[in-house]
Image: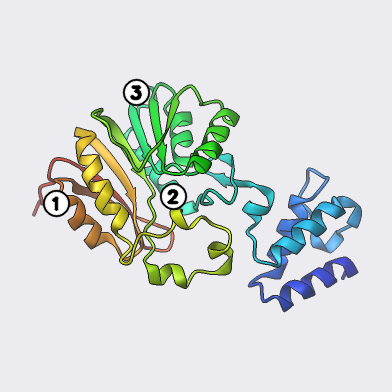
Amino acid sequence: MNNFIKIHLDILHEKKFADPIIELRALLNKTSILKKEIILSNFNINQINLSLFQLAFERRIKREPLAKIFREKNFWKYSFAVNKNVLDPRPETELIIETVEKYFQNKKQKLKIIDLGTGSGCLAISLAKMYKNSMITATDISKSALYVAKKNSKKLNVCKQIKFKCCNWYETKKNFDIVVTNPPYLTDDEYKNLSKEIKLYEPKIALRGGKDGLSCFRKIAYKINKITHFKSLCFIEIGHNQKDNCIKIFEEFHMYCADIIIDYQNYERILVLKKEKISNKD
């Protein structure tokens, strides 16, 4: 085995990384000066930017996520800029995009869309790319997060479609056809038990949902009832054991569950809500 590879694999083993080979390959490919994939079996040190690799490796063994080290994260079909002020987009959140696409198949529609708590802008921007005739409002309480989202909207050429607003969820008399949101939903206990990778490098404000994890859903339920009409659909990401409680919260504001989307780990992850009650058929 190449001595360079062995030394760094040994360090990753020592630091108790679950899969040192995957970790090392990811770092090598992120610091590669080549366009092709680096293979460990025939690795040559001249394939990488060595100083960049060493800096990245030192940060990674302190459990800093790759996305934070290299300031980018893939989501849906695009690469988004990220930093310490925004949550890294997760694969399960892509289910919101998939589900919106299932319900709104005509991509030429002039839809009014709102993304509550936009963070990096991944949902708002992906929907803007999909529905090019639509106008989108993207809100966040964090000015630092909105700066990142605006940067991504310019990078992906949708800044003219999206209006960014700094606020605590949203106050408006406007109605929207589509509401999407991935709010903080971890309980205090769940947050305490997170890995260092998340606790040290992801913004708390984007993760903590109060003692029971439901505080943001209570605020959102009140808001979305006021900004939706009877043909609107709301796509809400929830925690893996929150379905029943969330449905009850939204029902108090006359928002009823039309669909539940299961994620890749077989958790109930996305609620599709609408104002009119869905009748149960025998």
In this rendering, the label closer to the viewer, 2 or 3: 2
The residue singled out by tag 1 in the image is: 252
Per the model, the C-alpha gap separating discs 2 and 1 is 25 Å
As helix, strand or loop, the secondary structure at mark 3 comes to loop
Question: Measured from the top left, where is residue 141 in percent x and y?
Answer: 41, 43
As helix, strand or loop, the secondary structure at mark 1 comes to loop
Point out the tag, 2 or 3, that comes first from the N-terminus.
2
**Category of crowding for the residue at label 2, using alpha-carbon neighbours closer than 10 angstroms: few (below 14), some (14–19), many (at least 20):** many
Per the model, the C-alpha gap separating discs 2 and 3 is 23 Å
Image point 38% across, 39% down: which residue? 167
Per the model, the C-alpha gap separating discs 3 and 1 is 31 Å
Rendered-image quadrant of the N terminus: bottom right
Is there a contact, CB below 8 Å, between mark 3 and mark 1?
no
As helix, strand or loop, the secondary structure at mark 2 comes to helix
Rendered-image quadrant of the C terminus: bottom left
Q: Can residue 2 be seen in this view?
A: no
The residue singled out by tag 3 in the image is: 109
Instruction: Please name the amino acid that badge 2 sits on.
Output: Thr
Instruction: Please name the amino acid that badge 3 sits on.
Output: Gln
Point out the tag, 3 or 1, that comes first from the N-terminus.
3
